[in-house]
Every structure is written in C-alpha cells, then in structure tokens.
Amino acid sequence: MQTIIEPFRIKSVEPLRWTTRERREELLKAAGYNLFKLRAGDILIDLLTDSGTSAMSTEQWAAMMRGDESYAGSESFYRFEHAVKDLTGFQHVIPTHQGRAAERILFSILCKPGDIVPNNTHFDTTRANIEFNGATAVNLPVPAASDTQARLPFKGNMDVYALERLIENEGVDRIPLVMITITNNSGGGQPVSMANLEAIRRVTAQRGIPLYLDACRFAENAWFIKRDEPGYERLSPREIACKMFSLADGCTFSAKKDAFANIGGFLCTNNPRLAEQETNLLILTEGFPTYGGLAGRDLEAIAVGLEEVLQPEYLEYRIASTAYLGRHIADHGVPIVEPPGGHAIYIDAGRMLSHIPREQYPGQALAVELYRHAGIRSVEIGSVMFGKTAMHELLRLAIPRRVYTQSHIDYLVEAILEVNERRHEIRGFEIESEPEFLRHFSARFRPCPPVMHPA
Ligand SMILES: Cc1ncc(COP(=O)(O)O)c(C=O)c1O
C-alpha cells in the first residue's frame, strides 16, 4: 500500500472550540498581539509547540498507574533509568522536570564568564542558560543553512571547519563543551548527519572538549539518517540512535518531545565527578536523585515513550505527515524552509512578507494573521525570539505528536494559502514593552502603520 496512515486509532477525544474573527481580534488586542498570552481554549488548532503536547498511548497511561511515588528509591526511577541507559549508553542519568532544568544544571557547573559554547544552533533556553552564567553562546550552522530554499539533506549540520577555527582562535580552555542540537530546532528542524556527528566527535576528542547532544528530537533525527544517509538504510532507528549517543560524552533531553511525555527531561554524563556535582545541584532545586522534579508516574510515561518513539511505522508517518503540510503549501507558493523538517514546518516569513522589514517582525505579523484568520496558533522564530542573532525571520508550525489528523492539516493548508493570497495587506509590529530574558514569552506588541506602496 502507498498510503501512509496514522499508526494509531483514537480512544479518547477532546473537542475543539471555535471563535469568531471579531472575538479573535479582541483577544489579540488584549494579549498585546503576543500569542503566548492567549488562553488555549480560544485556539482552534494549536501549533505553538510540539513540546509536552503529545497524545500519550494506552501503554503510557497504563504504565502511569504503576507509578511508584516513593520519595527515595522509587521503582519507577529504576525503570526510567534502565530505559535511558539502554538507549543512550550513558553511565549517569539525572531526571529533571524538563529540558531547561537539565541545561541550567549543566551550564551552571561547566560555564563561567568569558567561556564560549558552540552549537549548530542554540535553542532559546540553551542560549539563555549559557548567557545567564556569563558565557557566550555561538551558532555554527553549515553555510547551506543560510539558504532557506536549498533542498539539501542535513542542513542542521554544524560547520566543522568553523568549529576548528573557533577553537584555534579562542583556545580550548575557553570552550567547556560543544553542543549539537538534534534535530536543529531553531535552524528549521533540519537533521544532523551521522558523518557530521562523527567529524565533530573527532575534533572535540582530539582537543579533550566534551561533546553534548541536545537530544530532544533524537528519534526524528535517526529517521532522517536512515532515510537519507547512505549506509544506514538497513539499520533500525534504535540502532542509529544508539550510535548517535555513543559519539557524545553526555546529553540534555526534554522528554516533552521524542518521549511523548507531557513533562520531564534528563541530563546524562559518563563523568562520575560531574555527575556528583550535578546531583548536588539537582537536590537543591529539582528534588531527590530518584525523582528529580518528576512524579513516579511521569518517569513511567517517559520510559514507555522512549520505546514507542523508535517504532519505524510511527517515524515514517511522523516525517511524512510533516512533509505533507510542507509540500502542500510550498508547492502553492508559500516559501518554507526546505526541505521540510521533522517536527515542524517553518515558513520563511521574511521572504513571504518581503514588504515588512526585519525591525517590524514579519514572523510575528504572520503568526498574528494566521490566528486572526483561522484560529491557528504558531510561533515566531526570528528577531523577536533571538534579537540580532536571528539568521532568518521564520514562523514555526510545530506539529504535536499523534494529536492532529490529516483533515486538520488540510484545514491548515487552506488557511495558510488564503493568508498568502492577501499577504500584501499584512502589517508589521513594534515592541511596546519587553522583559530582559526570553522576551517572546511576554513582550507586548502594537501594529505598525500600514506600509505605503509606491503607485
Ligand atoms: C532543541 C531544544 N532544546 C531544549 C529545549 C528545552 O526543553 P524544555 O521545553 O523541556 O525545557 C527545547 C524545547 O522546545 C528544544 O526544542
């Protein structure tokens, strides 16, 4: 059979809620045109994030009933630890309440003012946690990543030559770790090849610098390697994932992505001294080492999710359904980051709304318009999120795992194409008020005056 179907059937449903366009306009005004400030009940299709928004399976719900909520030595922890060690091979596994808690612990131990942490592209929380410790977060994407339209595989790779130069110029002592984000979320959800991971491993190992994976979407990355990298077609996603982890010295992980959990994360290392320091910090802010800020039932859900996410039928459907959205809008003239990534489609809003300058946030303008038009929530990944370090002005449509069906996606396609038809009417925004960190969460915006088109 050629048709790829959702590899699940639905047992429990959650009704959607419709609003009128007038109501959405009022809600937008009240929220300062910041979609993070909307109530979820006022959203029809929520593509703000794929993080923590997965539908859990019957096996995960069943496992949650087994949750052992003991303060110390919980059986759930040992099942969780076994699942993580079996997959990653790392010797020390530290549970955290989500990915950024793992980042905070790792960077506050490893980074000091003046240090530099390279990444293919830092996610906003990794950048913020590094900068909070006085270090500098540096992005080293491959040159191909700068062309959103180039249909090349593995545009999430790190520029190995640029990494070597950075280490040479700045000195090994200033680089406490190198990090690779798989898949490269802020770089358009593009995957990283095994060859690139191996090359970075060689560079870091020769110089004694630890290599860490930001492994949130390791399974989707493994599927791209299986599909597109010669020599891996016959390996299972699990075998590929194990090989990816074996190249690193540790990882941070948000279980809210490729573990189908609604909360959770972990931090891994092979270094016993570091593990001890991390555990001490964990106790201070997250909890005892056998739960680390999570309930026993959450640990159970993660353990099962880590198995399920590597099923080939799931990964084939997942990557194909994301590409379905991408192809259907791109083939009708909407510029997306090519080729479609794993967990999201990124519209190149800077290109689509070329009449809106960078300083007026084309990605934000498009996010607002999609909500106003069709009740769809998405997120700007550009100058609002990253300030001057933004490489592109993107709008991310993140697809929650196992949540929406093909007809939801068809509705999205229709809405996006309608907005694209009258894109010249869309106005930019300026920031009215903003906090110091992570401004996209709470900044308020106001619409800019209409653009005057030359006659
Ligand atoms: C690549 C990447 N790293 C880290 C994080 C942070 O994880 P969490 O939201 O669980 O704190 C995210 C979340 O979206 C992410 O996409």
Image (cartoon, rainbow, N blue to C red):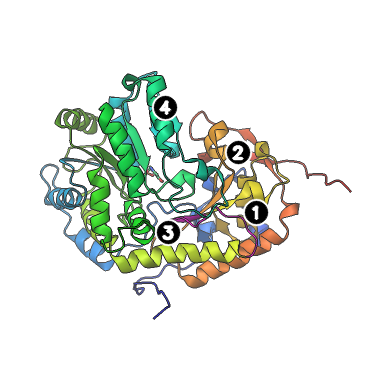
Residue 400: numbered disc:
3
- The first of marks 2 and 4 along the sequence is 4
Amino acid at the residue labelled 4: Arg
Q: Residue 242 location in percent, x, y? A: 23, 51
| Label pair 3/1, CB-CB below 8 angstroms | no
Residue 17 against residue 38 in the figure, above or below: below
Residue at the extreme bottom? 1
Mark 4 element type: helix
Label 2 beta carbon within 8 A of ligand 1: no
| Residue hosting label 2 | 444
Label 4 – label 1 distance at C-alpha: 43 Å
Q: Nearer the viewer, mark 3 or mark 2?
A: 3
Mark 3 Cβ and ligand 1 under 8 Å apart: no
Looking at the rendering, the stretch of residues picked out in magenta corresponds to 332-345
Q: Which mark is residue 404?
A: none
How many C-alpha atoms fall within 10 Å of the one at disc 1: few (<14), some, or many (≥20)? Answer: many
Q: Position of residue 326 (x, y in %)?
A: 53, 61
- Please tell me the numbered disc located at residue 369: 1
Mark toward the start of the polypeptide (2 vs 1)? 1
- Looking at the rendered structure, the kind of residue marked 2 is Arg
Q: What's the mark number on residue 165? A: 4
CA separation in Å, label 4 and label 3: 38 Å
Q: CA distance from mark 2 to mark 4?
A: 40 Å
Q: Secondary structure at mark 1?
A: helix
